[in-house]
Image: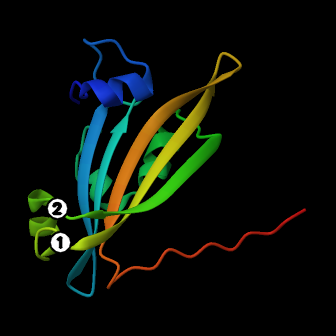
């Protein structure tokens, strides 16, 4: 649990003294790191056993702790790897990455509020983003 930086406090509509659950995770498949995940979540507490978040999907943990996500927006773009992300993904700094920002909302008192801000950086050599949309 940490005090988020100003831009995240603004996104989550938090006061300067409020804290949020901050997670940084590196996802791997077959021994290769393909994704660098950074998230800030309001409305949940830090798990008693932090190992729980190593085996439980974030949305499952949220739901199990009373946070129901009702709406999600996603923005996909490209960026260059920072030194921290490049180290985590074992790639050269400045390498091109696929950037995904996901904002997850929950209904509180009949209004939607942003509760989770997730920013993911993917190595495009190891990851593809695929969508299957069905239209009414």
Residue tagged 1: 89
Does the residue at mark 1 contact the one at mark 2 (Cβ under 8 Å)? yes
- The local secondary structure at tag 2 comes to helix
Total numbered badges shown on the rendered structure: 2
Image quarter in which the C terminus is found: bottom right
In the rendered image of this protein, does residue 69 appear above or below residue 82? above
| Residue 112, quarter of picture | top right
Image quarter in which the N terminus is found: top left
Residue 136 horizontal side relative to residue 89, left or right = right
Q: Quick check: can you spot residue 97?
A: yes
Q: Which residue occupies the foreground of this view, 30 or 136? A: 136
Q: Which residue occupies the foreground of this view, 31 or 8? A: 8
| Residue 84, quarter of picture | bottom left
- The local secondary structure at tag 1 comes to helix
Residue tagged 2: 85
Q: Residue at x 27, y 72 (%)?
A: 96
Q: Position of residue 63 (x, y in %)?
A: 53, 42
Q: Position of residue 51 (x, y in %)?
A: 23, 53
Colour logic:
rainbow
């Amino acid at each position: 649990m940490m005090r988020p930086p100003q831009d995240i406090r603004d996104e989550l509509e938090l006061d300067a003294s409020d804290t949020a659950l901050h997670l940084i995770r590196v996802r791997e498949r077959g021994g290769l790191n393909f994704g660098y995940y950074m998230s800030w979540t309001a409305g949940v507490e830090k798990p008693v056993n932090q190992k729980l978040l190593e085996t439980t999907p974030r949305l499952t943990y949220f739901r199990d702790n009373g946070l129901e996500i009702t709406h999600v927006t996603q923005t996909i773009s490209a960026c260059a790897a920072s030194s921290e992300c490049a180290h985590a993904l074992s790639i050269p700094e400045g390498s091109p990455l696929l950037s995904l920002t996901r904002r997850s909302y929950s209904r509180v008192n009949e209004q939607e509020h942003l509760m989770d801000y997730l920013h993911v950086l993917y190595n495009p050599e190891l990851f593809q983003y695929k969508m299957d949309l069905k239209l009414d």
